[in-house]
Amino acid sequence: MFMGEYSPALDEKGRVAIPVKLRKAFGEENLIDKLVVTHGFDKCLMAFRESDWTDFVEKKLMQLPQSDPKNRMAVRFLVGGASECELDKQGRMIIPAYLLKYADIKSEVIILGLSDKIEIWSGEQYGKNKPGGEILEHFADGLGF
């Protein structure tokens, strides 16, 4: 399972290093060497292992009625915007320029491990979207804390 918050840098070639804890999140024998990266919500990027991406597309996206124009737009946004990104031996991947532009990523990067996916944020956008205060209090209350 992916989890944790990391702050790698984006290099001049548009590469970001995926932390080794995330690359080994599903066991040493399953070291991740490729991720599918796409547009995310709230101006972040989402990255999936290939099998999780396939499940997401087949079991969630393609189950939505394609007669609804909003669903078709969502599929275009997520699937049409997706890119397979290979990780090099140092665990770095090149994020396509159109995705960097969408997420407003220039140098500071925040990576979050979120169970079956990774979110990749610009430091500035994550700062604007990071929950705190009343939101966390309401969430904790809903969980019974």
Image (cartoon, rainbow, N blue to C red):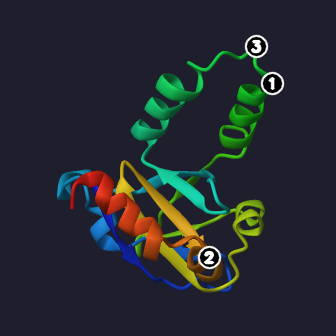
Q: CA distance from mark 2 to mark 3?
A: 35 Å
The mark lying in front, picked from 1 and 2, is 2
Residue 113 found in image quarter:
bottom left
At numbered mark 1, what does the secondary structure look like: helix, strand or loop?
helix
Q: CA distance from mark 1 to mark 3?
A: 6 Å
Q: Which of 79 and 91 lies nearest the eye of the viewer? A: 79
Residue 74 found in image quarter:
top right
Q: Residues within 10 Å of mark 1 (few under 14, many from 20)?
A: few
**Which residue position holds label 2?**
128
**Which residue position holds label 1?**
69
Which percent across, then down, holds residue 145?
21, 62
- Which residue is drawn at the image coordinates 45% and 41% (left, top)? 50
Q: CA distance from mark 1 to mark 2?
A: 30 Å
Q: Which of 35 and 120 lies nearest the eye of the viewer? A: 120
Q: Disc number at residue 67? A: 3
Which comes before the other along the chain, label 2 or label 3?
3
Which percent across, then down, holds residue 79?
66, 37
Q: Amino acid at mark 3?
A: Ser
Left/right of residue 65 with respect to residue 63 in the rendered view: right
- Which residue is drawn at the image coordinates 51% and 54% (left, top)? 47
- Which residue is drawn at the image coordinates 46% and 83% (left, top)? 7
Q: Residues within 10 Å of mark 3 (few under 14, many from 20)?
A: few
Which percent across, then down, holds residue 10?
59, 82
At numbered mark 3, what does the secondary structure look like: helix, strand or loop?
loop
Residue 131, compared with residue 39, is above or below; it is below
Residue 125, compared with residue 3, is above or below; it is below
Is any atom of residue 43 visible in this view? yes
State yes or no: discs 1 and 2 in contact (Cβ < 8 Å). no
Q: Amino acid at mark 2?
A: Lys
Is any atom of residue 132 visible in this view? no
State yes or no: discs 2 and 3 in contact (Cβ < 8 Å). no
Which comes before the other along the chain, label 1 or label 2?
1
